[in-house]
Image (tube, helix red, strand yellow):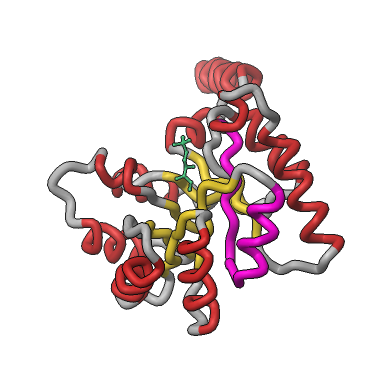
Amino acid sequence: MKFFIDTANFDEIKEAYSWGILSGVTTNPSLVAKEPGVNFHDRLKEIAELVEGSVSGEVISLDAEGMIKEGEELAAIHPNITVKLPMTPEGLKACKHFSEKGIKTNVTLIFSANQALMAARAGATYVSPFLGRLDDIGHNGVELISTIADIFTIHDIKTEIIAASIRHPQHITDAALAGAHISTTPFNVLQQLFNHPLTAKGIEGFLADWSKRQGQ
Ligand code: E4P
């Protein structure tokens, strides 16, 4: 499973990219709204020029015509831009359009296996099932990933599954085991993945022993 970061904050992206683990970035209108004064297109360009990999920018139109116009403007920013589209009939019409033009798409707000299958058939490069938001309403987000992964394997579907709405480190392990190709994760959760008390204790012990040796 590859790692994407789910943020529009450039400092977070730069830091996570420097760790050598990032294969892409996803943004959404709420994440961009957290960056006041930032021009959306300029930020996507800045991100795409730094990160080697897919950078999702989401449309806000609700009709296919508007989505296509917005998506074409986004795709013109950089070859790595992926047009993020909502899981609606209009979103799938736009998805089909971009797929025929060879422009990458990420169909977002996926909450069922049938939605994922439809998006894949409309030519989506990626589908984004939302784990955390499903867990929030008492459903099982990881189970959905696993079901989608099984269906895509049975039917030899090449669309990649992005485990989205990640809330904690266990989601990452579970999504990887369930067959997600990618997880898109907020910066604070990525930071948490480093943490293990035995790692910290081990470093402390090595340094203590080393400083004793220096005194000999
Ligand atoms: C997916 O691409 C979305 O940007 C994101 O993962 C949504 O997560 P949230 O439920 O934490 O808002």
- Residue 88 at least partly seen: yes
Q: Nearer the viewer, residue 169 or 115?
A: 115
Queried whether the magenta region covers residue 186, the answer comes back as no
Is 38 situated left or right of 190 in this image? left
Is 86 situated left or right of 144 in this image? left
Indicate the position of residue 45 as horizontal and vertical percent values.
Answer: 28, 66
Most extreme residue toward the left, as rendered? 37
Query: Which residue is pictured at 58% across the width and 48% down the height?
Result: 110
Q: Nearer the viewer, residue 148 or 25?
A: 148
Q: Is residue 126 above or below residue 211?
A: below
Is 61 situated left or right of 207 in this image? left
Q: Quadrant of the C terminus?
A: top right
Q: Nearer the viewer, residue 175 or 138?
A: 138
Query: Which residue is pictured at 53% across the width and 65% down the height?
Result: 92
Most extreme residue toward the right, as rendered? 154
Query: Which residue is pictured at 69% across the width and 41% down the height?
Result: 175
Q: Is residue 68 above or below residue 201?
A: below
Is 86 situated left or right of 113 in this image? left
- Residue 23 at least partly seen: no
Q: Is residue 84 above or below residue 131?
A: below
Write down the quadrant of residue 31 in the picture. Answer: top left
Indicate the position of residue 14 as horizontal and vertical percent values.
Answer: 35, 50
Q: Bounds of the magenta span?
A: 113-132
Query: Which residue is pictured at 50% across the width and 70% down the height?
Result: 93
Indicate the position of residue 151 as horizontal and vertical percent values.
Answer: 80, 56
Indicate the position of residue 104 as horizontal and vertical percent values.
Answer: 50, 71
